[in-house]
Amino acid sequence: MKVLLIKPMEHPQVVDIENALKEFYRILDCDCITATYPWEERAALVTDDNGLFTEKPFSRYIPELEQPIKGNFFICGLGEEDFAELPQDLIQKFRKRFWVPEAFVSMFGQMAVIRMDDGISYRNQKKYPLGQKRPGGLGLTGGAYGTQKDAGLWREGTRRQIHSG
């Protein structure tokens, strides 16, 4: 079945996997999974059940769940009683939504999410040269927390607080 696999600091990729628990464990590198249904669409978000308690890197922040995901996760469709192949329209929707990798930075007891846009378009995967402004985006990509801000390229709304401590 085709699913959308999202890994930390990578673009989402469509992969064809066997619809079996052992396969889910393999691609998520875990021994227990959790499926949540945070969207109106018939799609499941499948994650490592113990991911937040592991040393795996953070992957993406899911606002509907009000929490980040650690490690790999995938999005699949829903059948009558089981997971199913993700329809092409949902592959495109979620591929676009999760296209930009996110970095997580902890400072002063809070965690911030920084979108690490590398200039590659999710539509045609065209890479724009460093410093070349692309339509609707920044020319400079990635970098450390202070780098974008100090360079005057920090956009309001690209950082989200996800935890107060």
Image: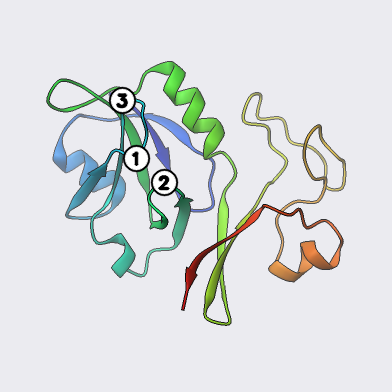
Determine which quarter of the picture holds residue 57.
bottom left
Q: Is residue 103 left or right of residue 26?
A: right
Residue 72 spot, x, y in % from top left: 37, 50
Q: Tell me the number on the disc at residue 38.
A: 1
Up-down: is 82 above or below 69? above
Please tell me in which quadrant of the rendered image residue 40 appears. Answer: top left
Q: CA distance from mark 2 to mark 3?
A: 15 Å
Image coordinates of residue 111 in percent, x first then y, are 53, 70
Q: Earlier in the sequence, mark 1 or mark 2?
A: 1
In the picture, residue 151 is in which quadrant? Answer: bottom right
Is there a contact, CB below 8 Å, between mark 2 and mark 3?
no
**Residue at 70% across / 55% down in the picture?**
142
Determine whether the residue tagged by mark 2 lies in a helix, strand or loop. loop
Q: Is residue 114 above or below residue 15?
A: below
The residues bearing labels 1 and 3 have C-alpha atoms spaced at a distance of 10 Å
- Residue type, label 3: Arg
Local SS, label 3: loop
Q: Quadrant of the N terminus?
A: top left
Residue that label 3 marks: 42
Q: Nearer the viewer, residue 142 or 164?
A: 164
Q: Nearer the viewer, mark 2 or mark 3?
A: 2
- Percent from the top left, x then y, of residue 17? 28, 30
Do the residues under discs 1 and 2 have CB atoms within 8 angstroms? Answer: yes
Q: Earlier in the sequence, mark 2 or mark 3?
A: 3
User: Which residue type carries mark 1?
Assistant: Pro
Task: Give the amino acid type for the residue marked by disc 2 in the picture.
Answer: Glu
Check disc 3: other Cα within 10 Å, few if <14, some if 14-19, many if 20+. Answer: some
Label placed on residue 64: 2
**From mark 1 to mark 2, how far is it between C-alphas?**
6 Å
Q: Residues within 10 Å of mark 1 (few under 14, many from 20)?
A: some
When the figure is inspected, residue 18 is found, relative to residue 28, above or below; the finding is: above
95 or 15, which lies in front?
Answer: 95
